[in-house]
Image (cartoon, rainbow, N blue to C red):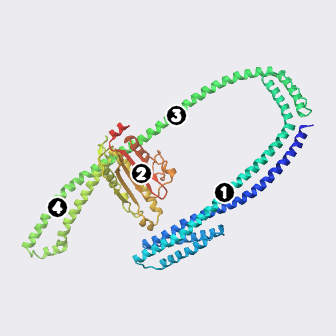
Amino acid sequence: MKLLHKFLGSSAIVVGLVALLMGGSTFVIRGAEIAQEVSREKTSQALQKALALQLTLEKQTSALKNFLLLNRNTSDMTEYHQAMSNFLLLVDELDRLMPEATEPAVVRQRHQFLVNLANELENNTKSTQAQSQQDVKAINSFGDDIALYLDLLVGNAQKQYNQTQQATEQFKQTAQIVTYSAIALILLIFVGQFLLILLPVIRSIQKLQLGAAKIGSGNLDYRLEIKTGDEIEQLSHEFNQMSAKLNEFYRCLEEKVIKRTNELSIVNESLKSEISDRKQTESKLQQALEELQETQIQLIQTEKMSSLGQLVAGVAHEINNPINFIFGNINHLNEYTQNLLELVCLYNQNFPKPGEKVELKIEEIDLEFLSEDLPKILTSMKMGANRIREIVLSLRNFSRLDEAEMKPVDIHEGIDNTLLILQNRLKAKPEHPEVKIVKEYGDLPLVECYPGQLNQVFMNIINNAIDALEDYDKQRSTEQMRDRPSTIAITTNISGANSVTIKIADNGPGMPEKVRQKLFDPFFTTKAVGKGTGLGLSISYQIITEKHRGTIRCISEPGQGAEFWIEIPLRQQANLIGL
């Protein structure tokens, strides 16, 4: 009898029995599972709705209290109406999910009292403080009353959910017993098929496997003897013929393999040498590229700071000379003017009638107004000249060309000098409103740092904040800018035993996480071409972390503005010892 006939007959019997057992048990178990799942889902939804009712009730009472106590804000009443609608929808859902429960009807009835009270509060535009307190007590009373029935409802829903869970677990245990019984019976059927049909075939295949192992180990003279009367016996005859042919070709193949192995060994050694040389070359190129990029950044930073320092120092020097001349002569001019005015006054007292021409000239030049306004003009000129001197001093302090070494300085002075230089960008202009500066300076001692480099960090961060606020204002309406004016807040304080923290925050558009993670990468910028090089924050990062052994980070989310945290040691020498 052929193997095909053996397997077809036995397999048909086995498949029929398996299908009968598995199909019947699966149908029964699946139907019960669906019923249990529907019941469990229904009770789970009822429990969730009941818990949601409690939260919605709290929102209603909270909104009504806020409406009474916070100047009757309409947004609080809008929040109450929304929560009330959600509350009623949830009660309707519980009626559908728990038709036998009486609590939803009672909750709806009790809730109507709260609704009536809310309608009276909304319509009553005037109320005294005493009346408001009574209304708050009434809200609390109605809320507690409803909450009591909600607790009962949640308890019933939880109890029903627990019962459903227990029934589900019992059903699963029963289903497992039935399934295990069916599996055991199927295993018995397969064991019978194995002993009667598959075992003789397996023994023949084992003989074939043993013959293949003998041939594989090099015994090409081994022959099989199988008498089963089926395809396996025919396969054994073909196996014996194959082993004879393999014995003939083995010697030729062995010679070819030895020759090819020698050739591959030579090629393999050549490839290894080439790969090693290529890896060394790639490593050197990568190292050279990193060194080139670092050198380029340092050259750009050095050139930028040198150019900026020379420009600022030159401008400060050129302005300082003439303004000192003007400022020094204003006092003399003021003294001379006072003397002339006193002389004119004395002349008027001694010669009350100087003549017609003199009187006409006095009237023409308005001598009385001139006598009052001229000292004011001189005072304004003196204030303006003094203001220019302060700006020149701030420019010199900002550049710090004569302070290349680390020294104790006043951090607040550096920030103020930076803000003074950026004053023109902070003022209101036709295309954007004023950027307000909020200072919250702490009581800081002198901090050891490189003043010029630290001022550059302040300049980069504040400049970027102004750019972000200007772009943000272009997208906002006038009403939005009036309700939320553009602001930069600067906070300083001592953190820990040997550190100072400077926070620079704006209320601009903020930035997504993927942009924030790349802020300090060289040449990364979100500005348009020609408006940014992408080096400002990268250089700032190097100045803080490498030059001052500190940390700098940014906290930002879209729509929440951006805040930079700079933390440096108060004493660099102490920090070095700690390292």
Nearer to me, 459 or 169: 169
Identify residue for label 1. Answer: 166
Q: Position of residue 119 (x, y in %)?
A: 51, 78
Instruction: Name the mark on residue 334.
Output: 4
Identify residue for label 2. Answer: 564
Identify residue for label 3. Answer: 285
Q: Position of residue 260 (x, y in %)?
A: 72, 23
Q: Are marks 1 and 3 in contact (CB under 8 Å)?
A: no
Question: In which quadrant will I find the C terminus?
Answer: top left
- Tag 2: amino acid: Phe
Q: Position of residue 527 (x, y in %)?
A: 47, 53
Q: Nearer the observer, disc 2 or disc 4?
A: 2
Please identify the quarter of the rendering in which residue 372 is found.
bottom left
**Residue 421 can be seen, yes or no:** yes
Q: Tell me the CA gap for discs 1 and 3.
A: 69 Å
Side of 55 where 540 appears, left or right: left
Q: Nearer the observer, disc 2 or disc 3?
A: 2
Q: Position of residue 441 (x, y in %)?
A: 32, 54
Relative height, residue 245 to residue 461 (above, below): above
Q: Tell me the CA gap for discs 2 and 3.
A: 36 Å
Q: Tell me the CA gap for discs 2 and 4.
A: 49 Å
Earlier in the chain: of badge 2 and badge 4, it is: 4
Instruction: Name the mark on residue 103.
Output: none
